[in-house]
Amino acid sequence: MKLSKLSEVFDAWASTDPFQAACTERATWNEEEFFAYGARHIESVLHAAEKKRPIPRGAALDFGCGPGRLAQALAAHFSRVVGVDVSCEMIKTSERLNRHANCGYVLNQAPDLRRFRSGSFDLVHSCKVLQHIRPKLALTYIAEFLRLLGPGGIAIFQVPERPKPGVSGTILRVTPSALLRPLRRIDMYGLSESAITSAIKNSGGKLLWREPCDDAGPRWTDWRYYAARAS
């Protein structure tokens, strides 16, 4: 799905149910439940990372912030947080719902993150986002994540690999996205570990480790990646 179309889809979704757009595993959310869910996710991810290496707690970027579920959660752990999203309406929603003075939001509809200075973040985080972006562009954004990291910084991002074996997985693998779109509203893509590792390496980074997760839903083999600058 092109960025312009992705922006349109999430603009429309933000005007009807921004919480469900960000987290489709439940049909309805209230505000307290939605943001508490984000807080639990960030606490879990940071705990997993810091069991292996400390993370500086200066600036954090949440890529694909939607209505601010994870950006606001990061604000409890970092001095400054920036949420970035392709959807103008999602940015408006996140600003309206924001509860933290150290958290701000930026609209970015470019196929890169060059509006941000290299080395300006201690953490770049993304969840439930790259799976909706065409693989070639998703790899470009992953390379940008590494560029943005400062000394000791870490990029933590989730990307599904492929549909799981079985009838539903086979349907997802062989059916063109355009035919599935009316059923699931938004495209889903997978990326191999080798493609992601190459993108990280080619941008001067290194893959630290990856762990299985289930953010893409039960039909996908899904991974969370932890990466850093190589030097």
Image: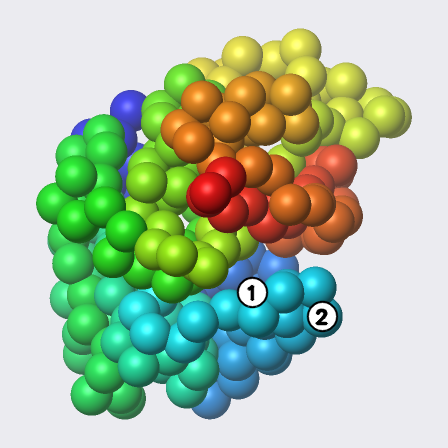
Q: Amino acid at mark 1?
A: Ala
Q: Which mark is residue 27?
A: 1
> At x 59% / y 78%, what residue is drawn?
43
Looking at the rendered structure, the secondary structure element under dot 1 is: loop
Looking at the rendered structure, the secondary structure element under dot 2 is: loop
Q: Amino acid at mark 2?
A: Lys
User: Quadrant location of the N terminus?
Assistant: top left
Q: Is residue 126 above or below residue 81?
A: above
Could one spot residue 68 in this view of the protein? no
> At x 55% / y 45%, what residue is drawn?
227
Q: Earlier in the sequence, mark 2 or mark 1?
A: 1
**The one of 83 and 208 positioned closer to us in this rendering:** 208
Q: Answer with left or right where residue 94 lies relative to residue 127.
A: left
Q: CA distance from mark 2 to mark 1?
A: 34 Å
The residue singled out by tag 2 in the image is 51
**The one of 62 and 86 positioned closer to us in this rendering:** 62
Could one spot residue 118 in this view of the protein? yes
Disc 2: CA contacts within 10 A as few (<14), some (14-19) or many (>=20):
few
Q: Is residue 51 above or below residue 25?
A: below
